Image (cartoon, helix red, strand yellow):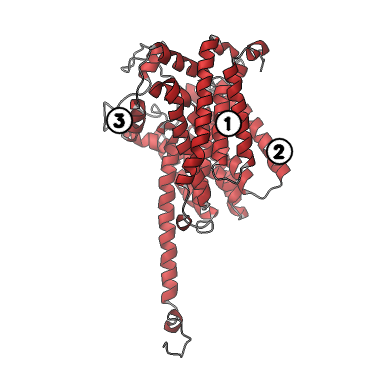
């Protein structure tokens, strides 16, 4: 990566103020790792760093704005950080799990049993995906053409999804969840046979995520396994540290390969120039957002975009005129036109802070985004406190999805978490009632005197 030091040194004071706040808040969270909110907060800070602080370093050519525009945008980053830090601890206390509703114990659902459930779900989803790919199992598991071809959860796979659109989307989110669960469970399983089976499942299923060309899904699947190993195993610190470094290097390589080949296919043999990490441009989008709001190019949505996001729960097959998201901003950015009936030929991610700015302006907007992310972090803190295997897995899924929220706080990112939570509730209901039934059956088989608290042959007084 070629650094343009002149551009970096010329960044306004608001950038360095935000960077300093980010470093101090991250250091505080590291010193308070035992607090339930610390790890989710650290992930939010890392998200801010990756999406907003790296662009001037990684892609200075995209930051060709005036000092006033830059300062306004990075002040919103500072406002976001300050508001998030103030809100996250308050909300974490409000969301804290009560001691009498901690959920199932760690041993109630062993990792091996959970693996069998997840493995069965994977086989069902893989069968559906293979059917959509006209029975071609090889192309289903290894979509070598990447975005240049088709993959099992694309709407164009096999034939247009049509009325099955909602089911295809749901299956895609569940598939991402299942693959992430494989990685999370691997460090938690104690029986060697199940560890081997889990490794085999990962080797067979994970290439799909890499080859189909999505950095977001790759992170959502891989990161939870890293967290599971670092936080929930008894490996020595130097081993954990080395593993983190190796994981970071692998992710850096994998994401660059995805960017380079995703529009050509991984079986392409021609010359392709190695791409850098394009797309980490939420800082420049934030500048557009703050400038458009300040100059009146776009009107504030006053919460209507959030309502449209929540409408994602309703399939478009049932609500044909379901509100579209981001159209006004895409038009303002110059993407109007095209053959689509939406009026634009592409939509643009605004970033989590820019999203708030377009809703409520340059002052209240970042505070609104901070509130949404603080609610998210507080819920993750609650899951961390509950400590059961199922809730721990859900916590790790959420940690893996947090970085993707940096592009937009949307259900399109969070659907794996939604389906994961439904799965967890179902599993806990089943195992809780099965455990209660086993205890009741055991008591029914005891001698009457033992049940009533007397020895056999004695009469209770």
Can you tell which quarter of the image residue 10 is in?
top right
Disc 2 target residue: 242
- Pointer 2 local density, CA inside 10 Å: few below 14, some 14–19, many at least 20: few
Question: Which numbered disc, 3 or 2, marks the residue closer to the eye?
Answer: 2
Q: Residue at x 44, y 44 (%)?
A: 420
Question: Who comes first in sequence, dot 1 or dot 2?
Answer: 1
Disc 3 target residue: 316
Q: Residue at x 53, y 20 (%)?
A: 74
Q: Are marks 1 and 3 in contact (CB under 8 Å)?
A: no
Image-based side of 17 in relation to 113, left or right = right
Question: Which numbered disc, 1 or 2, marks the residue closer to the eye?
Answer: 1
Closer to the camera, 458 or 150? Answer: 458
What number is the disc on residue 424? none
Disc 1 target residue: 46
Closer to the camera, 243 or 208? Answer: 243
Q: Residue at x 62, y 26 (%)?
A: 20
Q: Secondary structure at mark 2?
A: helix
């Amino acid at each position: 990566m070629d650094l343009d030091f002149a551009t970096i040194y010329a960044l306004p004071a608001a950038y360095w103020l935000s960077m300093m706040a980010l470093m101090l808040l991250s250091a505080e969270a590291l010193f308070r790792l035992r607090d339930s909110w610390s790890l989710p907060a650290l992930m939010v800070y890392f998200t801010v760093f990756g999406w907003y602080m790296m662009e001037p370093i990684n892609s200075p050519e995209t930051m060709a704005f005036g000092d006033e525009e830059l300062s306004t945008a990075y002040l919103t980053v500072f406002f976001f950080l300050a508001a998030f830090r103030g809100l996250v601890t308050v909300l974490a206390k409000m969301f804290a799990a009560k001691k009498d509703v901690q959920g199932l114990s760690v041993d109630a659902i062993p990792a091996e049993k959970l693996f069998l459930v997840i493995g069965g779900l994977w086989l069902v989803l893989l069968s559906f995906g293979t059917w959509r790919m006209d029975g071609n199992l090889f192309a289903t598991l290894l979509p070598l053409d990447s975005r240049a071809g088709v993959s099992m959860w694309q709407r164009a796979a096999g034939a247009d999804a049509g009325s099955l659109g909602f089911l295809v989307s749901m299956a895609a989110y569940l598939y991402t969840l299942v693959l992430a669960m494989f990685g999370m469970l691997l460090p938690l399983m104690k029986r060697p046979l199940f560890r081997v089976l889990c490794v085999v499942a990962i080797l067979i299923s994970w290439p799909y995520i890499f080859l189909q060309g999505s950095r977001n899904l790759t992170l959502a699947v891989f990161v939870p396994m890293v967290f599971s190993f670092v936080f929930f195993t008894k490996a020595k610190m130097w081993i954990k540290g080395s593993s983190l470094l190796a994981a970071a290097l692998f992710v850096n390589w994998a994401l660059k390969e995805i960017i380079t080949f995703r529009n050509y296919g991984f079986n392409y043999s021609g010359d392709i120039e190695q791409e850098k990490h394009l797309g980490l441009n939420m800082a420049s989008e934030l500048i557009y957002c703050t400038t458009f709001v300040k100059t009146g190019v776009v009107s504030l949505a006053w919460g209507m975009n959030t309502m449209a996001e929540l409408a994602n729960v309703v399939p478009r097959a049932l609500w044909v005129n379901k509100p579209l998201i981001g159209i006004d901003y895409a038009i303002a950015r110059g993407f109007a036109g095209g053959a689509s009936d939406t009026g634009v030929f592409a939509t643009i991610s605004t970033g989590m802070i820019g999203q708030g700015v377009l809703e409520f302006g340059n002052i209240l907007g970042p505070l609104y985004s901070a509130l949404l992310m603080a609610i998210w972090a507080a819920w993750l803190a609650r899951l961390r406190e509950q400590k059961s295997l199922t809730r721990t897995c859900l916590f790790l899924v959420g940690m893996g999805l947090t970085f993707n929220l940096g592009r937009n706080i949307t259900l399109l990112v969070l659907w794996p978490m939604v389906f994961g939570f439904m799965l967890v509730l179902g599993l806990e209901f089943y195992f809780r009632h099965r455990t209660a039934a086993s205890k009741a059956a055991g008591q029914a088989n005891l001698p009457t005197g033992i049940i009533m608290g007397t020895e056999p042959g004695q009469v209770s007084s």
